[in-house]
Amino acid sequence: MRNLAVIISSGKNEKEKVLTALTFANVAKKNKLFDDVKLILFGPSERLVAENDKDVMKLLDDFNSLGEKPLACQVVANNFNIIDDLQKAQNIKIERVGPIIKELSEKNYEIMTF
């Protein structure tokens, strides 16, 4: 079984990298390039969601429409004081992602970071 976790930690100054990662995650999930694809927003990428960046939100909506909500880190959101803004986004789940990343790694998910 081949599974993939895409972790996006790049921010506004690297928006092209964020969009590339989101596009890759969508293509991989839609075309079943892996048995499972998880998408995790971590750090500065969460600010793009909090700011309701239209390009990022479109790609998150696309991923969500494939049957699974991307995750955003609750701890980071609290530290950045953007939790309220993230909670307004209907296309993500906010959770503590540290334990999730640990679990995915123990389940032999390939981890790609952008």
Image: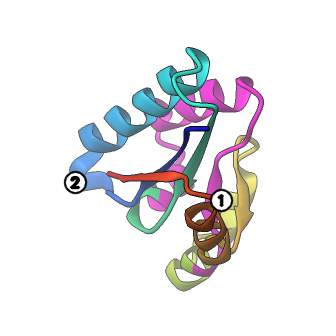
Marks 2 and 1 sit apart, C-alpha to C-alpha, by: 19 Å
| Residue bearing mark 1 | 86
Q: Is residue 48 above or below residue 32?
A: below
Task: Find out whether residue 64 is within the magenta segment.
Answer: yes
**Percent x, y of residue 22:** 45, 35
Q: Secondary structure at mark 1?
A: helix
Pointer 2 or 1: first along the chain: 2
Task: Considering the whole magenta stretch, tell me its main secondary structure.
Answer: helix
Q: Is residue 40 above or below residue 66?
A: below
State the count of labels.
2
Residue at (66, 76) in percent of width and height: 99
Query: Percent position (x, y) of residue 3?
Result: 57, 42
Residue nearest the observer in this picture, 48 or 95? 95
Identity of the residue furthest to the bottom in this view: 79
Mark 2 Cα within 10 Å, few/some/many (few <14, many 20+)?
A: few
Q: Which residues are magenta?
A: 46-75
Outermost left residue: 13
Q: Amino acid at mark 2?
A: Asn
Three-letter code, disc 1: Leu
Q: Is residue 96 left or right of residue 14?
A: right
Q: Is residue 67 left or right of residue 18?
A: right
x and y percentages locating residue 10 in the rendered image: 32, 57
Mark 1 crowd level (few <14, some 14–19, many ≥20, 10 Å Cα): many
Looking at the picture, the colour scheme in use is rainbow
Label of residue 13 in the image: 2
